[in-house]
Amino acid sequence: MTDVPALRLYNTLTREKADFAPIDAANVRLYVCGPTVYDFAHIGNARPVIVFDVLFRLLRHLYGAPNVTYVRNITDVDDKINARALRDFPDLPLNEAIRAVTEKTETQFRDDARALGSLEPTVQPRATENIAEMITIIEALIARGHAYVAAGEVLFDTTSMADYGALSHRNLDEQQAGARIAVDAHKKSPGDFVLWKLSSDNEPGWDSPWGRGRPGWHIECSAMSHRYLGETFDIHGGGLDLIFPHHENEIAQSRCAHGTKNMANVWMHNGFVQIEGRKMSKSDGNFVTIHDLLHTENFGGRKWPGEVLRLAMLMTQYRQPIDFSLKRLEEAQGIVRRWADAKVRVAALLAESSEVPAWILPQDSPILDDLNLYPVITGMNQLATDAVKGDPAAAAAFLGLLDLMGFEAIEHLSQQATDLDLSLADEDKWAGVTQRIEERLALLKARNFTDADRIRDELLTEGIQLKDGKDPQTGERVTTWEVKR
């Protein structure tokens, strides 16, 4: 395949950005960890759905839709699911109760993902439909000396892998148990984690060479990714919280079972989501589900369209943390309304045009730089303005960007643009903010605090307030920004 624009992606494994080179351009493969379907998905779960949908769309655009496979799994065997089934359906046999819980929550998750403007992944496998694949991988790990049986259970031997911990950059001595059920008495090493655990009569179970039991958490994704994408594939994605232990242990299982150098060549992780400056917690009363945001008036006294929720997520670079707030939603809704009004007028313009050029992703589009959407959204604002003034090329580009970002259902919003005087819609303020933040971070790393403070102060005078923090996984400095009114 020729003339594919260069796509640069940040790789958690190497801690740097690099040009993306698929193993096979005719078979580009992406795996993303999906939900554990014991409850409705919360707003934090929405971020990887949206982020990796944008990546999926971009890969389809670059390599052709038939040449991209996107797998997002459904975890439907888990101790939390068992507990929820016993609580909600005490009169049903356990297997029926579990099915009732998982079918309801999986259906709701898929409905929520569609409402957020996301495409269906190519495959959405259930963990319970891949037990045989898990058993095969565990048998291979035992045969290769990377796993052992202890009291009827099977554990991965972390000391058997020389570079275990490469993704999270942790030494083996720093590792904590990766199993969801503690089996310390059975472990050779504190970092060893469960591959297969025994099931009691009131727990779901499958026959195996080690007795009736159920899989550990991590082996599920190793099995499903291998079944649908192969021993080594292109990109593995998920939330920042999954780097350790889940993704670290996926890598260990898959590489050791198959004898490969890599499980996935690129590892991508989206940042955390906070609610109004606080970690989301049911006990704190700020636990927000996607369903509630879409269908109730519990957040800000109104329902929020999926397009608004989507843009609110995309307004922050995917690797940075998000403070999900009422203010952010109001800003996103103002921008979406502006685009909705422009789309109505653009449609009329295109109907009158005798020749509409096809939209082609520019070779230097910022979205190709690790999904940098700040200038893309800014550019959409400008394209909307130009298109309304009568430029067919701008009109085509505007609609193409909408399609790429997944706003196909935007027509149902108000067709009357509302000028909310949003600073985030002001191209002059938005353009260059990301570049200057990166420049400041480089200066801070070089301990040039004088010039770093100068950039911070300059941005503040322009109405952009910076917030410094630390990546909870790596300890590295991260900077977010917001409009200071």
Image (tube, rainbow, N blue to C red):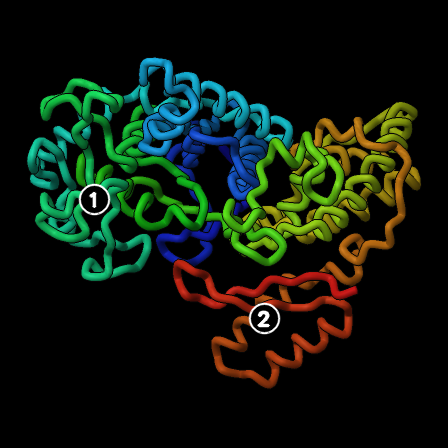
x, y percent for residue 462: 77, 70
Please indicate, yes or no, whether residue 483 appears anywhere in the rendered image.
Answer: yes
Residue at x 54%, y 51% (from the top left corner): 284
User: Is the residue 306 above or below the residue 463 in the image?
Assistant: above
> What residue is drawn where x is 17% and y is 47%?
192
Q: Name the residue under label 1.
A: 182
Amino acid type for the residue under numbered disc 1: Ala
The answer to whether 82 appears left or right of 2 in the picture is left
Of residues 218 and 61, the one nearer the viewer is 218
Q: Determine the secondary structure under disc 2.
A: helix
Q: Disc number at residue 483?
A: none
Location of residue 480 by image quarter = bottom right
| Mark 1 vs 2, N-terminal side | 1
Residue 341 falls left or right of residue 308:
right
Above or below residue 37? Residue 189 is: below
Q: Looking at the image, which residue sits at the far front?
A: 91
Give residue 238's position: percent from left, percent from top: 44, 42
Q: Can residue 379 be seen in this view?
A: no
Q: Name the residue under label 2.
A: 439
Labels 1 and 2 touching (C-beta < 8 A): no
**Depth check: 105 or 258 in front?**
105
Q: Which residue is drawn at 64% across and 28% down?
A: 115
Tell me the quadrant of the picture where the C terminus can be found: bottom right
Disc 1 versus disc 2: nearer the observer: 1
Q: Position of residue 394 (x, y in %)?
A: 81, 39
> Residue 182: x, y in percent?
21, 44
Real-space Cα distance between discs 1 and 2? 45 Å
User: Disc 2 marks which amino acid?
Assistant: Glu
